[in-house]
Amino acid sequence: LILKKLLRLYFFIFNKYILPKMSEPQEKPLSKKQLKKLEKQRKKAEAKEKARLERLRKQEEQQKLEEANDFSKGDYGKREVIKSKEKPGEDELKFTRVEELTDELEDQTVKIRARVSNKRGKGNMWFVILRQKNYTVQTIASKGNVSKLMLKFIQYNVPVESIVDIVGKVEIPPGAIESCTQQVEIKIAKLFVVSEAENPLPIQLADCEREEPLLVEQRKVIKELKEEEKEFQEKLEQEEDEEKKKEIQQILDEYENKKNEANKYVDLGRDKKLDNRVIDLRATTNQAIFKIQAAVCSLFREYLDERSFVEIHSPKLIGAASESGAAVFSTEFFYGHTAYLAQSPQLYKQMAICSDFERVYEIGPVFRRENSQTHRHMNEFIGLDLEMAFHEHYHEVLETIESLFVSIFDNLNSRYAVELETIQKQYPFEPLKYSNPPLRFKWPEAIALLREKGGQEIGDFEDISTTQEKLLGRIVKEEYDQDFYIIDKFPLNIRPFYTMPDPNDNRYSNSYDFFIRGEEVLSGAQRVHDYELLKEYLSHHDGVNANDLKDYINSFRYGCPPHAGGGVGLERVVMLFLNLPNIRLTSLFPRTPRRLFP
């Protein structure tokens, strides 16, 4: 038994370790020629390594020499993260705005904090373009003015879109600087990176700012090529002759080249921009758009404050739908209650009038649960609302709102010319045409225009569609050369329950809409302010639960002055004033059925 085990162990060791060695080919001694070749390779490798080490030595010597001669040392680098450790002296905080850089500052030393919009150069000279909102300025670093190491730092350690502090002297260049808004140059003396941007960027600012007409034409050409290509593809599938198939295939191959040639510009598309909105908003055009949006709000406030209106802030979390239950967002509330996001401040504006505020306005968010995928709808937008008590006729309010819009338009044109010019470069538009007082139609007159000039078949009391609305805008433009107009006396059957009927013809109402370039921007009316009348009109409207509105209805039991008002969509006003193609361009972070982020 022991002998068997020993034999098994022997054969295992023999098969595992000895036999493989015996089967390996025996190494032959190297020939003289092979030895000579190996020696040559060894010497070559030694020489290469020696040369590499010599280069490193020279580079180190050069680095030491440059560091020894670095007269810009301490004037450039990357700053530590600013944590507000200690407040510097007053002199350290004297930054100059880019828009303030004019020839009046020639030969003065300025300090600027801005974003690196672009940089170009090589070796002994670098141009760094700084951007601050929608203003840009060219700065220059050159050999002699700064050290070689500082030039290398600018080249390799200052990524585009980084935030930098630059100190330099203001100089006036010999010619115009077409790439910048400011017509001066800054000769760089100091440069520090405050916040470094990660590169590569997900989208480029140049692509965000590309002129819309170029992209529209490119899309058109590519679309036509694709349609033609599709026709040939169908012919290829139907063709049976092999020779003709080859000919068609050659044509299809050419279309691929044609599409590549037509695709000259990077077309990011709206979704790509919105996915990277933080970078997209840095574009000078977007900076200008939101300056205009802010201006509309401030001009709205300015006009109404001067006329004794009081700004209010109504709740956005409410116990009942403020307009129509079908288009409201709901959420669970405490103690088993359901809460709703306000569709408008309408009811609370009126309750404020009942509380003797007399004239009120509000700027705040509005929520609409509508699955609309159009160019002018969003699920959340900013509402500019106002309500005003009047003495004898609701036109007292209508004329106030007309004057408000004219004031806003006048001031946008006179006070924001720079921003409008910036927007024009990317999105060319014809300035809004309007009169003072604005053009005003009664409902029957508007319907007559649609029938006579637009060839539309529409009933006297039938609501107009979006298509007819735009058609009416084109007709008004052709007939009256106006982009801004009002329609008064809407049919009562297409207005909310709280709308006052026309006392001369109760088929119509004391209500109105304002339009810019054929699209509605304000809806308003005289409200029913009598308690008994309000209860009566409410009973005629299906889908409105009087019990849910009892607090609103009871407000009128204790006396309320006659009043009227309206609600404006901020983003839509800005979009139409600038004639932009989509409302998402005028919303900071749009909320639509398909977009909840970022």
Image: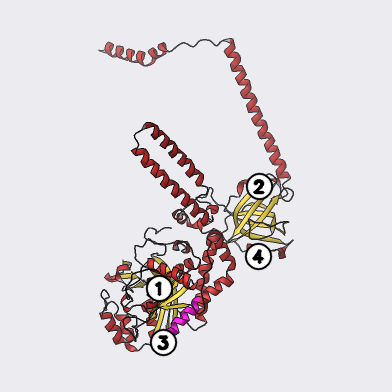
- What distance separates the C-alpha of mark 1 from that of mark 2? 62 Å
What residue sits 40% from the left and 11% below the top? 23
* Displayed quadrant of residue 175: bottom right
Which mark sits nearer the N-terminus, 3 or 2? 2
Mark 3 Cα-neighbour bin, 10 Å: few <14, some 14–19, many ≥20: some
Q: Nearer the viewer, mark 4 or mark 1?
A: 1
Which mark sits nearer the N-terminus, 2 or 4? 4
Query: x%, y% of residue 307?
Result: 50, 83
> Would you name the residue on which mark 2 appears?
121
Point out the image quarter for the N terminus: top left
Does the magenta-highlighted stretch encompass residue 260?
no
Q: Secondary structure at mark 1?
A: helix
Mark 4 Cα-neighbour bin, 10 Å: few <14, some 14–19, many ≥20: few
- What distance separates the C-alpha of mark 4 from that of mark 1? 51 Å
Mark 1 Cα-neighbour bin, 10 Å: few <14, some 14–19, many ≥20: some
Which mark sits nearer the N-terminus, 1 or 2? 2
What residue sits 54% from the left and 67% below the top? 291
> Would you name the residue on which mark 1 appears?
449
Q: Is residue 134 visible?
A: yes
- Residue 393 bears which disc, if any? 3
Q: Is residue 313 visible?
A: no
- What distance separates the C-alpha of mark 3 from that of mark 4? 50 Å
| Magenta highlight range | 392-405
Which three-letter amino acid code belongs to the residue tagged 3? His
Query: x%, y% of residue 486?
Result: 44, 76
Which three-letter amino acid code belongs to the residue tagged 1? Leu
Does the magenta-highlighted stretch encompass residue 395?
yes
Q: Secondary structure at mark 4?
A: helix
Q: Is residue 36 above or below residue 157?
A: above
Which three-letter amino acid code belongs to the residue tagged 4? Glu
Mark 2 Cα-neighbour bin, 10 Å: few <14, some 14–19, many ≥20: some
- What distance separates the C-alpha of mark 1 from that of mark 3? 27 Å
